Amino acid sequence: MNMDTYVHTNLESVLEELNRASILYKIDVDPLIQQLEELKQNDAAVNRHTLHYSLNKISMDEPNWTFLAAHLYLNELYAEASKNRGYKMNVKYGDFYSLIKKLTSIGIYSEDLLAFYSKEEIDQLDILIDPEKDYLFNYIGLFLLADRYLAKDYEKNIYELPQERFMIIAMTLMKNEDKAKRMSLVKEAYWALSNLYMTVATPTLANAGKSYGQLSSCFIDTVDDSLDSIYLNNWDIARLSKDGGGIGIYYGKVRALGSDIKQFKGNSSGVIPWIRLVNDTAVSVDQLGQRQGAIAIYLDVFHKDIMNGFLDIKTNNGDERRKAHDIFTGVAIPDLFMKKLEEVDGTGRSIGEWHTFCPHQVKQIMGWKDENGNPLGLEDFYDESDKKLFTEKYEEAVNHPLLPRKNYRAMDVMARIMVSQLEAGTPYMFYRDEVNRQNPNKHVKGNGRTSVYSSNLCTEIMQNMSATVIQNEYQDEDGNIIIVRKPGDFVVCNLSSIHLPNAVKAGVLERLIQIQMRMLDNTIDINQISVGQAKWTNQKYRAVGLGTFGWHHLLAIKGIHWESDEAVEYANDLYEDIAYFTIHASMELAKEKGAYKLFHGSEWHSGEYFKRKDYSSDRWKDLQEDIRNNGVRNGWMMAVAPNSSTAKIGGSTDGIDPLYAIEYAEEKKNFKFKVTAPDLDHNTYNYYRRVRHELNQLWSIKQNAARQRHIDQSISFNLYVRHDIKARDLLQLHLEAWKHGLKTTYYVRSTSQTEIADCEACHS
């Protein structure tokens, strides 16, 4: 709904909202009421003037005007929905069953809602819908929810209202539950959503209950070194992108520039042309027609093409024929590379040497094989705590006289990484050894071999990966060409996030996480994913990513300064509780529905996961024993996504990020208005005062290390730096992130960059 489109509203209802707001939010509305007296013959002008007046009044001195603006905007939504659905506006919400019938009949809602729920059940849920919960929204949260997520007809007329969206999500995610308890589970899910104790990810928020789109947030594919794999990957990601998924692709197995093809020397064009092809797909295949596809491509720092264009692929200098400006990039980095950065001579000059190789040539010449005789490359090994397999294999490759390589100072490679980060925000950093060491499902490959090669678009997903390959192609008796593909592990993750300030303040974390994990787990079974191997992987591991947002908001209302040991300790304590409740909820689901298929042999099963985390208290020992007996439902459970859009809907701060500014203008294509820090008052101001680029990033790293200990996947973690940061200072931040055991870092956000758009699929 466009801000400048207004439905006629009675002056009396506007005055009623003004008087109510003046009491609730302690704002002076008398000057506005006097102005409205001159407009009382023109209802549309009254509403327009009142809303614009309220939006213009929002400031750090008077932040609560945002709630009055939200009240007025609610009246507009009620008026438009009532007009489109044919009921009186003063009842606010019309008949719920009639809404479902109408939107099902025109093809907006899925027929499942009426197939799974009787009219009697829907009428019971209608009674639970609470319009008063709409008053929890601030203006930007309500505006974004209405603009992007509420169900509309094909002419973009609003039919659905906020509480109905929440109820539809609850009904959709619980539709397959046992009928004896299904209604109580729907009510519990609605409780969690309507109180803004949590949010679901953008695809679920937008598509649950509808006849189109899918519900999962993140996908990661592995491209094999073949023409078939490259083009089939492109086809797969086009289909996922169309349905609204954010995608990561690992390209580290594809041969480098100048490598041989069918033994003809020097014919390979390397990875850059293929990445440009993916770039064109991202631009061409819209996500539900709302935004272009969002794709990140990862390459190993020991791949020969890392310095043959990959690190410059998003920068504005150089040959445009080797650019892919719409792709996001990530670099997979072993511990050995970071150690090389610390090697210096007597003058302090960096002397660590780094070698890059073509993965195809490594497999040809080195002769490493797995237990089935398949060739292995450097990318297939990682350094464990006590067994440095990657380092051993890397040194073997370096010392082989016949293996081609390019030689650099490690610091020169890192300098190119940092130049790109300061200009374009990427590449993301993926610390591959730490990721694989911490993987609870490394048993699938074992023997110190890599299971996780890269991450997703927002760097928080860490799951087992392998390439899908064509096994056979033949013609059947009817002349049809049949292609048989052996599915690899095509990573899928389903996201949802806790609204930390609301949930912690209400003391509902345990209850909330229990229903939240059920909602996430059910998403796996009801989701319609267009790529078969992704659906198979999703069913095999049942991976979910429960995350959080509102960290800075929570610190402010608790009176904890960002740059303090207290914040680090609180992160450790809070996220340990969240981890315990999450793993316990997954165990309870396994007791009820069964463990994920590959539970036996995992670190959840052996208890190694808990030992490595040093979980030794009685509650953890009891939980470990319960898991040994019952299993866990989900192979991976926790991941903290960026949560920008959905955090705004919840009225809080993004993910685990510090605040952007105490007061700023939020601007997109169709709106611009002021926003202030949540719960801003004379008490919280002092804890918000130092914002993103002013804070010492080392404290952010320490906080993130504390929470990372308890997260089995990873965290979307940005580094905020000034545009004039010295190279050695940025390098030091990267070294500190690695030394503190972070698995990934997301964007390097410089003050010289325009605000970088996150992948909205991963907002949860």
Image (cartoon, rainbow, N blue to C red):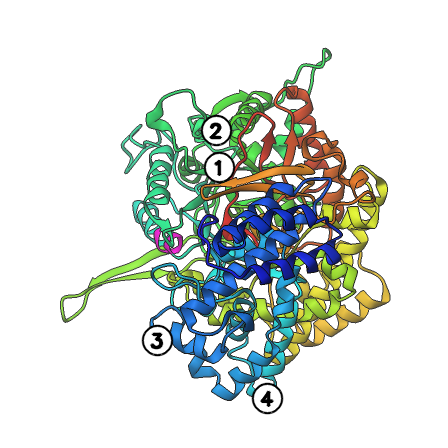
Q: Secondary structure at mark 3?
A: helix
* Side of 483 relative to 184 (left or right): left
> Of circles 3 and 2, which is in front?
3
Q: Secondary structure at mark 1?
A: strand
Q: Nearer the viewer, residue 245 or 227?
A: 245
> Nearer the N terminus, badge 4 or badge 1?
4
Q: Which residues are magenta?
A: 238-242
> Of circles 4 and 1, which is in front?
4
Q: Which residue is mark 3?
A: 105
Residue 62 makes an appearance in the image: yes
Q: How far apart are labels 1 and 3 at the CA level?
A: 43 Å
Looking at the picture, does residue 71 appear above or below residue 247?
Answer: below
Q: Which residue is mark 1?
A: 329
Work out which quarter of the rendered image holds the C terminus and state it.
bottom right
Question: Does the magenta stretch mainly form a helix, a strand or a loop?
Answer: helix
Q: How many residues crowd mark 2 within 10 Å: few (<14), some (14–19), many (20+)?
A: many
The label on residue 51 is none
Q: Which residue is mark 4?
A: 180
